[in-house]
Image (cartoon, rainbow, N blue to C red):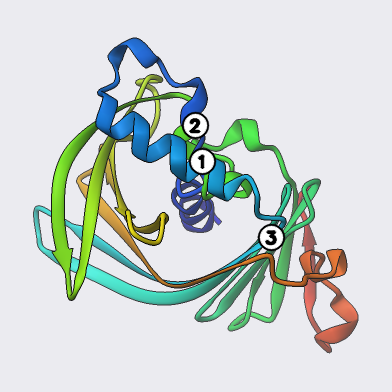
Amino acid sequence: MKKVMLLLSVLSLMLINPATSISSAQDNQSSALLSKLSKTYKTYKSVKATFTIDVKNKQTDVGVKQSGILYQKAKKFRITMSGQEIYCDGKTIWTYLEGANEVQISKFDPKTMDINPSEIFTIYEKGFIHKYSGQVTRGSQKIDVVELTPIDKTKGYFKVKLGIDKMANKVKEMSVYSKNGMVTTYDIQKFEPNVAINDAYFKFNPKEIPGVIEIDLR
């Protein structure tokens, strides 16, 4: 469960909101990029993002790579990855583990997390000092990189590098640098805004999975 919550915290970093950052500490180039990005994301009613995640220990150079799909609508989200599915309707969070055929049910409290998963594409809007750190090339794409430093030093991470496709005005990648030496990098393979999603899609339905064991932790 701890590993799952870490995943949610990192994913939620991708929903940032720059408008309420400490403006006196920011540079104009990063402010312009983030402001434009924020305005675009705020027009979306819902989001579907296909991503890969690469978790690597920088000291040992050992890593794990996975792929997944994120659906997000207002305060609700659903994440599908190999062997597990995470549902949240904004009040309750269900973590289904396929191998054990069990679902853990918890009250969703964003205050207990470093970052709220329902804000995955607007996280930069508050709680960060940001600066422009240059441009990199990914295939034929030019990616502008903005470095984010959390104002709250009790967070489990000390730096986030946000890669922005300036032409498409979308988040392309994000790397989160944790204090324990782990670096988690997300690469957005496909991004689809305003997809039609019923609210019921964000709730776990035990009737759909025969024999599932329910563990209520609320």
Q: Are marks 3 and 1 in contact (CB under 8 Å)?
A: no
Residue situated in front as seen by the camera: 4 or 134: 134
Dot 2: within a 10 Å radius of its alpha carbon, few (fewer than 14), some, or many (20 or more) residues?
many
Estimate the spatial distance between the alpha carbons at disc 2 and disc 3, rounded to whole Å: 18 Å
Quadrant of the frame with the N terminus: bottom right
Location of mark 1 (residue): 38
The percent position of residue 59, horizontal first and vertical second, equals 9, 53
Location of mark 2 (residue): 125
Residue 46: assigned label: 3
Amino acid at the residue labelled 1: Ser
Q: Quadrant of residue 101?
A: bottom right
The percent position of residue 138, horizontal first and vertical second, equals 19, 69
In this rendering, position of residue 188 left or right of residue 46: left
Secondary structure of the residue carrying tag 3 is loop
Which residue is farthest front? Answer: 167
Secondary structure of the residue carrying tag 2 is helix
Estimate the spatial distance between the alpha carbons at disc 2 and disc 1, rounded to whole Å: 8 Å
- Front tag of 3 and 1: 1
The percent position of residue 211, horizontal first and vertical second, equals 82, 86
The percent position of residue 210, horizontal first and vertical second, equals 83, 89
Amino acid at the residue labelled 2: Glu
Which residue is farthest top? Answer: 24
* Image point (69%, 60%), residue name: 46
**Considering only order in the chain, which callout, 1 or 3, is on the residue closer to the N terminus?**
1
Amino acid at the residue labelled 3: Ser
Residue situated in front as seen by the camera: 131 or 142: 142
* Image point (9%, 60%), residue name: 60
Q: Are marks 2 and 1 in contact (CB under 8 Å)?
A: yes
